[in-house]
Amino acid sequence: MQGVRITVAYTKRDECPQTLVRQRRYKRHFLTGMSCQEVYSIRRFHSDTSLYTLPKKPFSEQRPVSVLLYRSQCPVCNSTELKSIFKKPYADLSTWIEKAYRRRGTARPEILRDQVYELCRCTQCSMVFQRGYPSDDLSSELYGKWIDGSKIYTWKFHPMPIRHFDYTISQVRKVVSSIEKIPREIKFLDFGMGWGDFSLAAKAFGAQVTGVELSRDKQEHGRQLGINVVEAPTDIYDVIFLNQVLEHLPDPVAILSKLKEHLADNGLIYAAVPNGTPVYNCAAGFGEAQFIKNQKIVAPLEHLNVFNFDTLRQAGKSAGLSAEIPPVDALSRATLASIKGRLFKKLGLAKATAAEVFYRHDKS
C-alpha cells in the first residue's frame, strides 16, 4: 500500500511552529499563572519534573487520544480509600455543558461522550473531588476555546458593578493589614492574577506587586496596567494571593508546597475557593437534585476539588503550613454583607459563597 503524504497549513499565530518552539522554552517553569478562567495543561507533580507545561503541539480538531485522566488517591492526604458519591455520564451532561459555556466560548461536549463525571469522597480526610480531570489536550481546548478570554472580559467586566470593586479592595485590605509592615514594603504575589483587578488594588495600597499568569492576553493586559508579570515566582514574598485557584488544580498540595518556598518567614498565603460546605452536608446522599443545586461548586471539568475550611486546613497541613480563619474587614459594605451572611448562616438562613484561609509557616 502506497504511503499518503499529509500537509498541514498553520493559519493561526498560536499554531505556527515558531510559536511552538517558544512555548517549549517554558517547560522548566514549575508554576504557571492560574485563574478561575484559565488552567493550562495540568500535569501531576513529580519531584524531578515541572508541575505544568504548555502543550507541545496544537490541539487537533479530532477527538483527543486522552480526554480525561483519573486520580486514584486523595489530592489532600494521598489516601487511596475513596468512596464514589455521585456518577453521571458526560453524554447526559451535554445540555448542561452547552448552557454553561454558551456565553463564554464554543464547547464541544461530544468529545466527552464516552467519559463519566464522578465525585469521590476520601474516607480519611473527607475531601470531595472529581476523580477525572482534563488531559493536556482537553485543558488547552477548554481554557482556550470553551472559555474564550476576550468574551469573558467583555461579558464579565463591562460594565462592572461597584460592589465588585468594593469586594476586591476589601479582600486585599484584609490581607495587607495582616502583615506587620507598612504597605509600601510588602512584596505581594498575585498567583493567577487573571485580568489584574486584585493586583491593581494591591498597587493602590503601595505594595510591590508581581503577577503570575500564563495567558498571553492577560500577561499583556497586566503589563499595560503597570504590573510586573512573570511566568514563575523567583523572589520571596510577604503575601501570596490565591483567589479561586486551588479548586482547579489536580494536585493543590504540590502547588502550596512550592509556594511555601517563596513565602517570607512572617508572610502569609491567602486562599479563597468556592465554599463546598453544602456538598459536604449532603455527601452521604448526594444525588441528581444536589448536583443541580450545587452545580457551581462541583462544576464538571473546572472545579476539580471541593473545599471547606477543614479540608483547606488539611491541605495546608500536608504542605507544611498552618491555617487560620482570616479576620473580618469591618470597613466595607462587602464585609458587612459577609457578617450578615455569617449570622444568617448560624441561624440556618443562608450560606457563605466562599471559603477563605490564611496559610503561614507551621512553626510548631
Image (tube, rainbow, N blue to C red):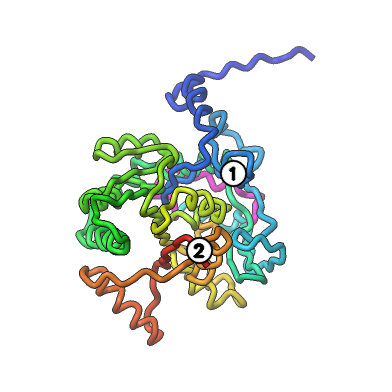
SS state under label 1: loop
Work out whether mark 2 precedes mark 1 in sequence or the reverse, and give the earlier one: 1
- Where disc 2 sits, the SS reads loop
Determine which residue is flagged by label 1: 43
What residue is shown at x 69% (from left), y 56% (from top)?
A: 72
Question: Above or below — where is 199 with respect to 303?
Answer: above
Q: Residue at x 52, y 51 (%)?
A: 255
Start-end of magenta stretch: 100-116
- Residue 353's spot in the image, x, y percent? 39, 69
- Give, as a three-letter code, the residue at label 1: Arg
What is the residue that sits farthest to the right in this orientation?
A: 1
Disc 2 target residue: 362
Where, quadrant-wise, is the N terminus in this rendering?
Answer: top right
The verdict on residue 109 being magenta is yes
Q: Residue at x 23, y 50 (%)?
A: 184
Q: Is residue 161 above or below residue 289?
A: above
In the drawing, does residue 254 fall left or right of residue 327?
right
Residue 277, position in %: x, y? Answer: 48, 73
